[in-house]
Amino acid sequence: MEFSQSDDHNNLSLTKFESMLKTNNVLFFDSGEFENIIYHYLEIGKIALAKKAIKMGLGQHPTSVTLKLFQVEIYVLEDKLQQADKLLDMLYLLEPANEEIYIQKASILSKRDEHQKAIDTLMIALRLIDSEDDEADIYALIGMEYLFMDQFENAKDYFIKCLDLDNEDYSALYNIIYCFDFLCLNSEAIEFLNQYLDNNPYSEVAWHQLGKQYCTLKDYKRASAAFDFAIISDDTFVGAYLEKGKVLEKQRKYHEAIENYKITLALDEPTSFALLRIGNCYDKLENFDLAVQYYYKTVQEDPLLDKGWIAITKFYNKQHDYQKALYYINKAINIDCENVLYWKLYAQINHRLNFLEEAERGYKKTLDLGNYELDTWLSRADILIQLGEYEASALNLIQGAEFYPETAEIEYRLAGIYYSLLESEKGSYHLKNGLLLNPEFHFIIEELFPNVSKNISVRAIIMTAKKSSN
């Protein structure tokens, strides 16, 4: 709900209203002033003040339909849909040709997931409006309803209608490209953007989006050119420099990538993304001193960015400085103890350092947090075997087998565990399963259970399987 408003008059009304709230003196405002005050507070998200203005406005202008429509908007925001419906029904009797009534009704229907009904209602509103701005707003609402229903082709068509009415409606442009992306129509998106750029050659947003489409198709030469045009159109466009940096990285032009990322640091507040990418580039150039400096800057800039902590940990891992790697992954875990990637690295580093109890704890936590990769189950099982915790290892492998049934690596380990526990019948069962699944993997028994591999019955089962396969 937008109103034409004089900034000076509006500011005066706001100052007068807020002064009144502080002094508890009741002042009179005309209905237009209340409308502008309420609209202002809704725009900046101060709902409590908007509600106060609505209450006071309706107290002074009880017959104002516009103020009552604001009340409907508040009801919808607060999910008081029944009250909103009731008030709208009353307003419909007063002004059946008021398009805002249909727009608010559509909003209620949308909240109830009745998106097709919301679209039908917005179509009625469309017939009642008399300005292009309002028409574009309703097209955008219809487009969003189609998005909610995953009808991306229809959504795209309505966002294109918005763009036809206002070629600088970048929200519509982004939504159009989102639809093309979801429909995997990258070539069609490129054609659309090129047509748009024929009429709007200095649209940095369109050039930026065109570059991203070329990136998806791995056409890095054209992508780089598109980002160059975005920068020519607006040489302060940080997003274009970032994307160009990523393209240059793909082309292994690390020095040029660093230059583009550094421009973003000069144009705006440093971002952890740019700092991390610079660190990665220096890492690839084997300039390890500068690489680690930028990794440090990344985690200082954004301690919650997991990619930063992972980068610095992996950096020291590659340098075989496992103590430092462990130090930094511990710092990361202290900041976010529910990050599964941190725990996986924690487990792997402790494993390399032969801190078996800590490594086992790390793998267990990784599994508890939902990382069910096969190597996680196997690594934890192997550590438990080394620690002599055969029953715990067997339980871990049985749980893993629920996710990876008929997996030779699991079967051989279970065979070795049960033979070690002198449960030969179970051991034989799992050994035969392993040999059926992959006879080449029987070396697992020799590596993890050297004593079991010398067992006469175990050797006999393996020899029999070999003869059968020949």
Image: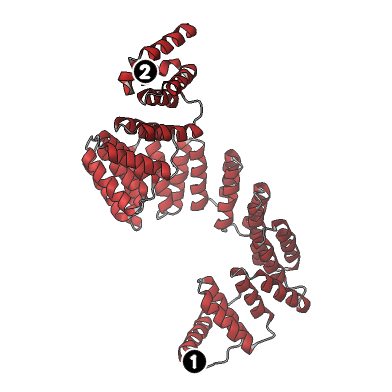
Residue type at the position of mark 2 = Phe
Which image quadrant for residue 116?
A: bottom right
Location of residue 455 in the rendering, given as x and y in whole percent from the top left corner: 35, 15
Q: Is residue 180 left or right of residue 441?
A: right
Residue located beneath label 1 in the image: 24
Report the front residue among 60 and 36. 60
* Residue 189 vertical placement versus 433 (above, below): below
> Which residue does the image show at 33% across and 47% down from the upper left?
308
Q: Nearer the viewer, mark 1 or mark 2?
A: 2
Upstream in sequence: badge 1 or badge 2: 1
Which image quadrant for residue 391?
A: top left
Q: Is residue 454 visible?
A: yes
**For the residue labelled by badge 1, is the local secondary structure a helix, a strand or a loop?**
loop
Report the front residue among 338 and 267. 338
Give the class, few, some or many, for how many residues have Cα within 10 Å of label 2's Cα (few <14, many ≥20).
few
> Which residue does the image show at 25% across and 39% down from the upper left?
316
